[in-house]
Image: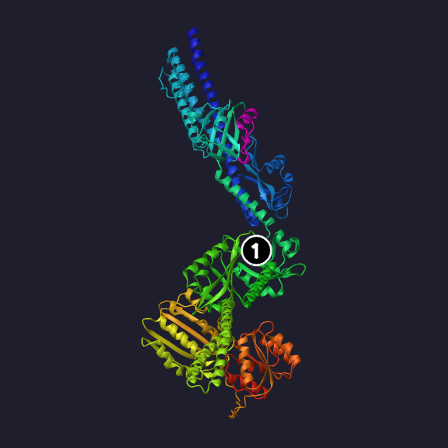
């Protein structure tokens, strides 16, 4: 009976206890699973709300910046369509509702309408600028506070204000679904438990201690989590049923474990679960990817090790949420600037939240951390924030005016620079049309065209027009306009950038005026001026330069200075000028005298090049100047040559004077001798030879005197062509037969004023020189042309602009180099060696000076030489005096008057005294002028015969004294030299009646007698 009782009790107790145990176990599992499902639902809901609110935040910020209220309301209405949405509203900084899913709430205080609205969380969200989600695990509603940058106040948009999107989300439907699902599972399991109990009652008598031990052992295996243990199918009846039930339970737990792992691994966010110590218990693949740790590596390691986080802005570590969550049990949300540093040092911007894991008794078992990679979103947000900040700073601080217009051409906004430019404040002109304030009447037509082009997006992006300021000033503005186009391609407004260019335009006009004035000044200068780049490239050249060089701007601009045609005649000159430019570019100033080539001639210029420095002291350009130095150069050469000729003239004149004195003695005494020895047989022949020799000496003296005189003494009008034709035979004979003489004479009259004898000597001189230049024969060409020499060429030749006869003498000889050409007019210079023993071409040079003309030489080695002689053209007077032939009666040459003979040469003085004594005159003598002045007061003198060149007082000075104090005394001057320094006399007839030495007795007696009788002297050559 006892065993039966025990058996009965076992049969009854075992099913009941099994049922109770299984029921409790299943209830715990079901309850734990229900809590996990709720926690996962809670985490997923929060994550979903976090992402949804971030997307809404970004879209609303864009529409707020665009001030698009319609799109804001449309976005909120989209959120309201979600069944779980209870409240969705946009609240400004003062807690006033701007937009809401119920329009009746607009402009009302949120705290009055929504009792659950927490002002502390609202304020904290504004300050920390991150989304806050409030939720009680016992309720199904979520209260979301998301910060948003507003550009509006309660009634009007304004930049840089932080408001809040307040969102109430009811998740009761999902909670109910989880509960129903759990309840259904509970019912099914309950049915299985009851069925198991019945089976247990049937088979319990088959089960005793051994199957029970096996069952206990199997149960222990299951309890240890070893789901791979197979069912031993022990006993029968209840135990077998219990074994099967336990096996089913094992499979169900295994399936739940697998489902949990699949769920965890399928979540798109990273999930990490820890135990109560904060060590990692679970983590999904996303968490492994972001942290760089695998579950195997991380399991059992502190979360602080595998989840190091820092602040993205300050780079300082952030406290790990595990300590706060486990110690306080609060849900923690990290800031938007959280950066996760992975195991491999890769950095991720993350958004995360951490919540405690609680058991059925609300005891904390660990923590679950959910986070996701928001790096790209963070970058976009930061770029947007930075862009907005830069745009705001640019709007406020740019010196350029900026204006925003609507399509009606009305002011929407303008920055401080535009306010200052036009004088209007934003509040004064906002909403006004441009014609009401800043657009003058004169500019309206052009601006209307620009505006029409902008609205059609066909132009008008840049314009310039006058504007009027608040104080009435007219300013000139440059406008840069940009149409604002929406997604549909419609122009919804215009943005303008404005620059006040009034002063710039004034300075530009002033600069242009200065430039024009400078160019006019440069073009009016007489010197040649060119500006160069530092590398020597010509950038400007003045008009006188082009005129002198006979070029155009296209010939010289953008060319190197040294490569111009004016230096092309010499490579060495080009290299020198290039070096001068390089030195000037280095800061030097260079000046030199150079020759430049102009067509068929060369021009001497005073050349200089100097640098122009900028404010930093760097060379920004060069200035090259050239002053025509040809006239000065020719004057210098002429002066040097004239000095040489003057010195030579004095020497020649001195020699002629002394020679004349000696020749005069010979001539005079020969005449006396002829008169005394008329009856001496044979004496006349010898005396005639002496007189013939003296005549030759007189001709030589004449040439010497002509050379020493500044003017020709026998110049007269003559036809050059006739003279040359008459001289042709002499020239041809002097050239020999190997040289061909070719004449090309002008058919017009070639009247000139010159000394024919000197002209023929000059032509013969050059012809002989040409003969020596053509030892192998050649051609000597002589041509004449009537020409007019203009001012420019006249300066080069150092003569006056006028009509000239150009005589050209050209040979085909050996030519000359520059060194020889520069010396050919020097006295006694010759290339003929000992054969050249005369005055040379200096005689020709002197002749051309006396003729008032010029001579120019062009020669090229190996090709010949050309002499160009320029004679002033002589114009015959319109009226002519009749030539009256008067038969002159030879007067009686004897006399009885008293004559004072003054001469420093005793021989000549005695000769004159003797000739005059023989003619019956009374003679007094003096050795110089002073001695003569001592004699004149004490003697009665009719005529003074005086030499010109004497010591102490010359003949001119003596004559001047006599004319001044003794005007009744007649004066006859004699001279063997015409270069005297005192040539200006009050009575010009003294010089005109000069008796030149050497003279014979007849000439002397004739001059004296005619002068005493006041008769005209006949013309007599010197």
Taking depth in this image into account, of 652 and 312 the one nearest to the observer is: 652
Residue 329 drawn at (x, y percent): 56, 26
Taking depth in this image into account, of 523 and 954 the one nearest to the observer is: 954
The magenta segment is 312-337
Residue 937 picture quarter: bottom right
Q: Is residue 164 above or below residue 472?
A: above
Residue 229 picture quarter: top left
Chief secondary structure of the magenta span?
A: loop
Q: Is residue 50 above or below residue 480?
A: above
Residue 268 belongs to the span the image colors magenta: no
Q: Is residue 860 above or below residue 236?
A: below
Taking depth in this image into account, of 568 and 755 the one nearest to the observer is: 755
Residue at the limit of the structure toward the right, as seen here: 471
Residue 181 drawn at (x, y percent): 47, 30
Taking depth in this image into account, of 26 and 50 the one nearest to the observer is: 50
Write down the residue under mark 1.
496
Question: Residue at point 45% right, 58% down?
Answer: 576
Mark 1 neighbour class, 10 Å CA radius: few under 14, some 14 to 19, many 20 or more? some
């Amino acid at each position: 009976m006892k065993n039966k009782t025990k058996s009965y009790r076992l049969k009854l107790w075992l099913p009941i206890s099994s049922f109770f145990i299984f029921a409790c176990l299943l209830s715990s599992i079901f309850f734990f699973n229900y809590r996990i499902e709720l926690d996962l639902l809670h985490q997923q809901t929060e994550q979903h709300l976090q992402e949804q609110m971030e997307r809404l935040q970004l879209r609303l910020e864009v529409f707020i910046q665009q001030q698009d209220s319609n799109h804001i309301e449309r976005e909120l209405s989209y959120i309201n369509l979600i069944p779980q949405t209870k409240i969705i509203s946009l609240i400004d900084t003062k807690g006033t509702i701007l937009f809401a899913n119920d329009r009746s709430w607009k402009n009302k205080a949120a705290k009055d309408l929504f009792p659950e609205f927490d002002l502390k969380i609202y304020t904290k969200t504004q300050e920390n600028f991150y989304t806050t989600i409030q939720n009680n695990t016992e309720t199904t509603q979520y209260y979301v506070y998301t910060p948003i940058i507003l550009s509006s106040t309660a009634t009007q948009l304004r930049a840089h204000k932080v408001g809040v999107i307040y969102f109430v989300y009811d998740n009761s439907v999902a909670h109910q679904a989880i509960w129903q699902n759990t309840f259904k599972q509970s019912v099914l399991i309950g049915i299985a438990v009851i069925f198991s109990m019945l089976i247990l009652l049937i088979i319990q008598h088959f089960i005793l201690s051994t199957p029970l031990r096996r069952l206990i052992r199997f149960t222990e295996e299951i309890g240890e989590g070893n789901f791979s243990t197979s069912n031993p199918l022990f006993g029968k009846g209840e135990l077998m049923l219990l074994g099967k039930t336990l096996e089913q339970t094992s499979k169900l737990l295994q399936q739940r474990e697998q489902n949990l792992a699949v769920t965890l691994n399928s979540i798109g966010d990273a999930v990490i679960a820890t135990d109560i110590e904060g060590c990692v218990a679970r983590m999904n693949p996303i968490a492994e990817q972001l942290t760089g740790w695998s579950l195997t590596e991380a399991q059992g390691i502190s979360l602080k090790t595998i989840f190091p986080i820092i602040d993205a802005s300050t780079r300082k570590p952030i406290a790990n949420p595990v300590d706060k969550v486990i110690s306080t049990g609060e849900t923690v949300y990290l800031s938007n600037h959280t950066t996760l540093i992975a195991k491999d040092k890769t950095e991720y911007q993350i958004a995360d939240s951490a919540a405690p894991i609680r058991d059925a008794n609300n005891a904390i078992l660990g923590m679950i951390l959910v986070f996701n990679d928001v790096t790209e979103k963070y970058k976009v947000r930061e770029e947007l924030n930075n862009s907005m900040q830069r745009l705001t700073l640019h709007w406020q601080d740019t010196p350029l005016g900026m204006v925003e217009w609507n399509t009606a051409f009305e002011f929407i906004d303008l920055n401080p620079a535009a306010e200052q430019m036009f004088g209007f404040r934003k509040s004064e002109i906002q909403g006004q049309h441009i014609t009401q304030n800043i657009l003058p009447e004169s500019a309206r037509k052009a601006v209307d065209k620009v505006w029409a082009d902008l609205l059609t997006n066909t132009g008008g992006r840049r314009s310039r027009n006058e504007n009027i300021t608040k104080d009435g000033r007219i300013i000139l503005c440059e406008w840069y306009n940009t149409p604002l186009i929406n997604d549909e391609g419609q122009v919804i407004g215009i943005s303008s950038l404005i620059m006040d260019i009034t002063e710039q335009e004034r300075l530009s006009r002033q600069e242009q005026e200065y430039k024009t004035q400078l160019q006019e000044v440069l073009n009016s200068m007489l010197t040649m001026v060119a500006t160069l780049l530092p590398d020597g490239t010509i950038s400007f050249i003045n008009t006188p330069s082009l005129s002198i060089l006979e070029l155009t701007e296209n010939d010289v601009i953008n060319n190197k200075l040294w490569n111009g045609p004016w230096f092309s005649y010499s490579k060495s000159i080009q290299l020198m000028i290039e070096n001068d430019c390089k030195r000037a570019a280095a800061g030097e100033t260079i000046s030199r005298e150079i020759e430049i080539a102009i067509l068929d001639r060369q021009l001497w210029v005073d050349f200089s090049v100097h640098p122009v420095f900028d404010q930093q002291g760097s060379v920004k350009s060069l200035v090259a100047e050239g002053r025509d130095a040809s006239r000065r150069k020719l004057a210098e050469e002429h002066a040097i040559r004239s000095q040489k000729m003057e010195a030579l003239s004095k020497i020649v004149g001195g020699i002629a004077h002394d020679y004349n004195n000696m020749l005069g003695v010979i001539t005079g005494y020969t005449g006396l001798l002829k008169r005394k020895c008329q009856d001496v047989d044979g004496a006349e022949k010898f005396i005639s030879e002496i007189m013939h020799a003296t005549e030759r000496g007189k001709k030589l003296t004449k040439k010497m005197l002509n050379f020493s005189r500044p003017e020709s003494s026998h110049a007269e009008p003559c036809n050059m062509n006739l003279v040359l034709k008459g001289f042709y035979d002499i020239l041809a004979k002097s050239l020999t037969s190997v040289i061909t003489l070719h004449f090309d004479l002008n058919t017009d009259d070639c009247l000139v004023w010159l000394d024919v004898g000197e002209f023929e000597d000059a032509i013969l001189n050059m012809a002989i020189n040409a003969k020596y230049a053509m030892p192998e024969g050649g051609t000597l060409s002589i041509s004449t042309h009537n020409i007019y020499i203009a001012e420019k060429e006249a300066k080069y030749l150092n003569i006056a602009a006028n009509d000239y006869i150009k005589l050209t003498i050209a040979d085909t000889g050996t030519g000359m180099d520059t060194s020889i050409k520069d010396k050919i007019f020097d006295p006694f210079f010759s290339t003929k060696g000992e054969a050249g023993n005369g005055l040379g071409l200096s005689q020709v040079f002197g002749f051309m000076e006396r003729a008032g003309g010029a001579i120019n030489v062009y020669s090229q080695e190996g090709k010949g030489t050309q002499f160009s002689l320029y004679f002033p053209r002589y114009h015959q007077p319109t009226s002519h005096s009749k030539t009256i032939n008067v038969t002159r009666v030879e007067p009686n040459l004897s006399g009885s008057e008293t004559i004072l003979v003054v001469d420093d040469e005793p021989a000549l003085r005695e000769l004159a005294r003797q000739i005059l004594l023989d003619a019956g005159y009374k003679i007094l003598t003096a050795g110089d002028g002073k001695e003569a002045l001592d004699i004149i007061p004490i003697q009665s003198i009719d005529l003074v015969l005086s030499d010109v060149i004497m010591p102490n007082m010359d003949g001119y000075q003596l004559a001047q004294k006599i004319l001044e104090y003794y005007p009744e005394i007649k004066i006859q001057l004699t001279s063997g030299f015409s270069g005297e320094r005192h040539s200006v006399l009050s009575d010009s007839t003294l010089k005109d009646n000069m008796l030149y030495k050497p003279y014979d007795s007849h000439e002397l007696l004739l001059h004296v007698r005619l002068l005493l009788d006041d008769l005209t002297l006949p013309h007599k050559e010197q």
